[in-house]
Amino acid sequence: MIGKLSMSEVVSGVSAIPNPFLEQIGIVSEEMHDGRARISLELQEQHMNSWQITHGGVLMTMLDVVMAMAGRSLHHDQKGVVTIEIKTSFLQPGGVIGGKLEAKAQAFHQSTTMCFCDGEIWSGDKLVAKAMGTYKYLKSLKSKASLQKMGGTD
């Protein structure tokens, strides 16, 4: 079921919602509870840009995911969120093949429909990027037809 987790998954503190895109990239959920989340990524060749450093799109994906997880963790049903905006500052190169990145986020404010989060990516003791994001909470999507309508397809 999209946007819903069993109580055992919520208690474990890690998001268990399947996401083929994140699985393909190799992002691992480490922690998710009380408005906080943490994910990690072992850097491989497919994560690099033409200069052989981590591609900015990989960093943005990590920040978006970890901040969304932090926002979702504030609800027992971990309802879905959609990204409204992200502002990111890249502070230094993200890492090379064989390195590991860790992204951390916390929700610092929420309303009934929106959540505001801060996120960071670390490579060891080096701060790589910082972001702030705004997320809108979604009602449960109950069918494939609802998803298709949301995506603008028939």
Image (cartoon, grey):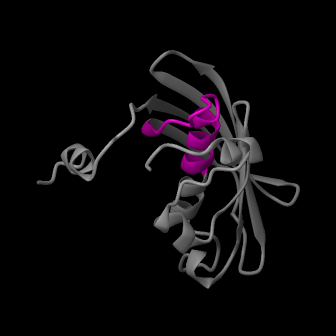
**Residue 69 included in the magenta stretch of the image:** yes
Residue at the (70%, 46%) spot, across then down: 8
- Residue 81 position within the rendered picture, expressed as x and y whole percent measured from the top left: 46, 37
Write down the region rendered in magenta.
Answer: 63-83
Residue at figure coordinates x 61%, y 54% from the top left:
16
| Residue 68 painted magenta | yes
Residue situated furthest top in the rendering: 111
Q: Quadrant of residue 78?
A: top right
* Total numbered circles: 0
Determine whether, in the image, residue 57 is placed left or right of residue 103. left
Left or right side of 29 for 2: left
Answer above or below: position of 8 versus 35.
below
43 left or right of 71 in image:
right
Q: In the picture, which quadrant includes the C terminus?
A: bottom left
15, 7: nearer the viewer: 7
Q: Residue furthest left?
A: 154
Q: Is residue 123 visible?
A: yes
Toward the viewer: 84 or 7?
7
- 28 sits left or right of 122 in the view: left
| Image quadrant where residue 142 sits | top left
Taking the view exactly as shown, the residue that stands out farthest to the front is 7
* Image vertical order of residue 136 relative to residue 22, above or below: above
* Residue 14 position within the rendered picture, expressed as x and y whole percent measured from the top left: 70, 50
Q: Residue at x 59, y 78 (%)?
A: 51
